[in-house]
Amino acid sequence: MLFVGVDIGGTFTDLVVMDDDGAVVTDKALTTPHALEEGVFNALTLVADQRGETLDAFLAQVSAFGHGTTQATNALIERKGARTGLITTQGFGDTLFIQRLQGFTAGVPSEHLGWYSRRRYPDPIVARCLVREVPERVDQAGAVLYPLDEEAAREAIGSLLADGVEALAVCLLWSFRNPVHERRIAEITAELDPDGRVFLSLSCDVSPVLGEYERTATTVLNSYLGPIVEHYLERLETSLRDRGFTGTFSVLNSIGGVMGAREAAEHAVLLLASGPTGGVIGSRYLAKELGHRNVITTDMGGTSFDVGLIIDGRPVVSAITEVGRYHVSAPMVDITAVGSGGGSIATVHDGLIAVGPESAGASPGPVCYGRGGTQPTVTDANVVLGIIDPDHFLGGRMQLDRAAAEAAIERQIAQPLGLTVLEAAAGIRRIVDAQMADTLRELTIGRGHDPRDFVLYAYGGAGPMHCAGYGAELGVQKIVVPTTSMAQSAYGALASDVQHSAERSALMRGGGGPQPGWAGLEAAAMEAQFTELEEQCHAALSRYGIAEADRELTRSVDMRYRRQTHELIVPLPDATVDQAAVQRVVERFEQTYEDTYGRGAGFREAGIEVTTFRVDGLGRTRKPRLPQAPDHVEAPRRERPVYDADATALVTAQVVDWISLAVGERVDGPAVLEHPTTTVYVASEQHASVDEHGNLIIESDGVPA
Amino acid sequence: MTTATQAQARAIDPITFEVVRHKLQAMTEEQAITLKAVSGSPVVTDATDFNNGIYLTDGSIVTMGPQVLFHTGTMSAVIRNITADFAASPGINEGDMYILNDPYKGAVHQPDVAIVAPIFHEGRHVAWAGSCAHQLDVGGMNFGSWSFKATEVQQEAMLLPGVKLVEAGELRQDLWQMIMGMSRLPMVLGLDLKAMIAANNVAARRMVEVMDRYGADCVEAVMHAEIDASEQQLRARLRELPDGVFRAVDFLEHDGHTDALYEVRVAVHKHDDALTFDLEGSSPQAPGFINCTHAGLVGALFTALLPILAPDIRWNAGLLRAVTVKAPEGIVCNATWPAPVSSGTVSAVWVVTNVAVMALSRLASCDERTAGEAAAVTKGSMTVLTMSGADRDGSPFGTFMLDSTAGGGGAYADHDGLDASGDYCVPRPSIANVETNEAAGPYLYLYRRLLADTGGAGRQRGGATIGLALTRTTCHGWTPCSSATASKCPTPPACWAAWRDRPTAIGCGRLTAAAPSAASRDPRRWGSTTLRCATWVRSPGSSS
């Protein structure tokens, strides 16, 4: 029996196959944007070849096919979604265009916020002429102040259908408190579109939380992407079935669970961060097996550095995520991306050096790629320093031009600064490492976490090459480069559980003045919220065929001091809420708060507010055991000179083939570990070894293994 | 800079310089994250009306955040006054923090409360960390401390000239309770003050860590060198531009007592690598709350300068070193004590920003390299709308509605102004959701939308403003109060065709100035409204 994980990225489609014994095969094929399933089949064929099987014979053994995809994200970025109509409460049809004024700074790095002349709103996802306002009004308590004008609603839907919309989104004010008007609009739509040709999303289903801009954006994106995702998944699943695949077919969503094709299409917006989430989920699976409770995941690619956190075994989740310069209000794995990657460009202006956030990306790419890039990048620096062997890049599949990289750094960086070319290249590396370390500090120390309690996982094209620098600077216990580091997202798609979250905004207030925070918070009312949400989760998990014994439900609430707008997520034990439990959850909030913002930062006198109730449901699926380290292949260790950026000196580094390392065998830094698909750098005063699963563990000397 | 520090700066390699510099900026980002997370005020969390930074021991700005820019220009004056007044007694020691909101000692106006903390490394005072945030209420005769009937500063709000609120790491309860007792919304003020204290703590802790690692000498040298670099870059840019005098005028319309016109005139003298802003010819100070002090004037000029002449230069005190400000005492934008100033930010400070944007845009449009940054005035006025009274449950309620920041943006030579652009003084603006506001207080929106044809005409048009209508949902003790300017004197366009290859007019932000509009429907519907109002407020039961 085989398990397959696929990650369809912008450039490559990565594939991981694992068998019952945990043996892993990875491969990649170019992504085929015109028909993504082609790239998937190309990669499947490559793996079948590796195994000496025909594609059909290979597929017949696959029991689970999980995949992550940037397809939804790309459709959004390229504005290739469905022609979508939007229905809003009268008077609020511009909400999606005003964007709370955040649209023209979304995605702009803080260094560039001062360029007022470059500010632009994003291209719309709904044409203004396809927005209809209908008379109706519900208030903050859920009371109907003005009943839905059904004639107007009928007229609005009819005119949108006549305008040829392929999808409809409905977002009315306060609909998450009282969905009656949105539901009625759905009924009228069904009357006018009896064949169900139009894809319909209601905000009370897609994103039932406070905040009409984000709720509208989320609902519209769901409709905008739904038809495309639906067609694509249908096509892919059918073509797999046609070739003999009989296992379960699932898609990884942005909260790190898998969904079936139909559910994924209905919740297309949840696929927007599917790709990077896979890396975090793969890491979580690995971390659980390795006994790492707290993990910082770092994915350094060509253009960005993506960071996620796993705390107490759970990925940290954020309530609002910015995608394609819109804001999605649905819980998603919190991934912070900054513009530091292998393609980050180094420049000197007026004697000051800067690296990034501009990137040469994959095209034209670094100078050493010889594809037209002229500005030196981080990758060029790594070639000049001797960390990347220009003759063996990607297992020798791509020849790099070291002389060109050297010339670019010499002319554009070293000369203007009066440095040698090696010093300049080392400088580029030190700066980018420090930037990443600063980001990691903000995300850990800045939020009350001590990095010394964490293990750092490094993957992506450039992560293993730089983790020695940013990991050491951060002061983590140890660094893990997973054996699946070159396809970590695909691994996540393979390793994920079924996940369904249900949440609801409901404001409850306690305390204030001299009273304790729990005074006035009613246990029974809280329990009622959780009960209802749990029913929803159970129903969803049972639709997916998860037996009751394999379900795991966790409760949490968002809490804050009254009048704050920023909440902390506080977990509750899985037991009926009683008054003692209410007291414990308030105490836990206050403790977390002070841990995060410092002693005395809490302000109990303001009172406590519970704003959102949430149940996260997990359905455990059958999974392969962790991979075993493959037998090592004898290969001689070599040496080559490498300029160590921190030591600022030429050192003699051991060059070791990763696959030649036996379990437990130690390599002292400075060393370069080469693998057909990645390069790992181990700095001076660090050492590395391979664990029993084939992962590479890097530790600082002096820290007991 | 002393010769010794220059020598140190030269000794630091450019790589270490960039690494340490990035850490200083990261500290300021972390200050902002902390402040927003702890604060309970929508003014801070949604409208980002605050700023943070790191300053040299003499108050020079080293780093600042992308929030309200007015605050930053004034922080140097805050620190310099505290140093001059209190270094001897009660002293500036490790673990201390001072709180200040006196506009004659550096605040822009009284609601902009600053808390600054000296940072010590190994017993030596090495820098300051500071935070400043607009407070919903700091006392005085009206809710929100917008004191439209005031004739002197003593009536407007509490006045904190620099008071040691935190002493050796301990919050002084006596002062804390005194300050809380003077506010109508002590809970909100309390959270915000705690937020600023937390933000300063974060910066101080981080600074000590960085100095431990790289050495205090190194970090201090980087801070000085960073300021020098920005100064040199701005001077180099100024040298590229032609010498000349660039003038602009704009108006304030009402002083809270009478409907009089006040002029704000600026002449920007650009000579070689320096700029002089001359405010000679501006009207004498007003008897009402529209004035600003010297601190507000500097904050306004700094704000105007940054996006036009320094969008690609790191923002710090170096930019101010190339600038001289000449302003006679006793004018509306350099008032002398005890003139009232509580509306200064949206009155004199705002209009100084307008004239400076106009004059600097004319200068910028003289050279192809900077012409792209020249713009018409963005949102030439700011409508203040406060609401106070009883909440749904009868408890005290008050808010400062910032939807009016969604006015129209000024046009550029090559593209239209932004619809709903946010204020010029805010690099990363934001407004609250309608639902967030309705959840927070007893009122209901009838609409919030873009208003057609509110963008000024031109080959490139100005951006459209939003308009909104509100009604209250409870009937007891509810007082809306709105003030706005520029309903009568539209903001003039910023620049004409000075650039020879673009011989066309640039669209102006004329009507975009009047945000949010739907103005002056029927003044009888305006409860206790005082000035001209740009927002339509309806009470339950009224017929329209």
Image: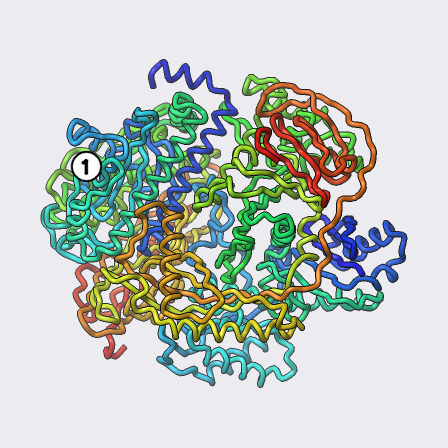
Name the residue located 41 percent from the left edge and 37 percent from the top edge: B27
Name the residue located 63 percent from the left edge and 74 percent from the top edge: A542
Q: Position of residue B190 (x, y in %)?
A: 25, 51
Give the letter of the chain under mark 1.
Answer: B
Q: Position of residue A442 (x, y in %)?
A: 46, 42
In front here: A218 or A3?
A: A3
Q: Position of residue B151 (x, y in %)?
A: 9, 49
Note whether residue B322 is visible. Answer: no
Q: Is residue A411 above or below residue A332?
A: above
In front here: B125 or B255?
A: B125
Q: Type of residue at label 1?
A: Lys
Q: Secondary structure at mark 1?
A: helix
Q: Which residue is mark 1?
A: B105
Q: Is residue A62 above or below residue B106?
A: below
Q: Quadrant of the C terminus of chain B?
A: bottom left
Name the residue located 63 percent from the left edge and 20 percent from the top edge: A421
In screen coordinates, is B183 left or right of A562? left
In screen coordinates, is A614 left or right of A233? left
Note whether residue A510 is visible. Answer: yes
The coloring applied to the image is rainbow
In front here: A107 or B391?
A: B391
Give the class, few, some or many, for how many residues have Cα within 10 Å of label 1's Cα (few <14, many ≥20). many
In screen coordinates, is A403 left or right of A270? right
In screen coordinates, is B99 left or right of A274? left
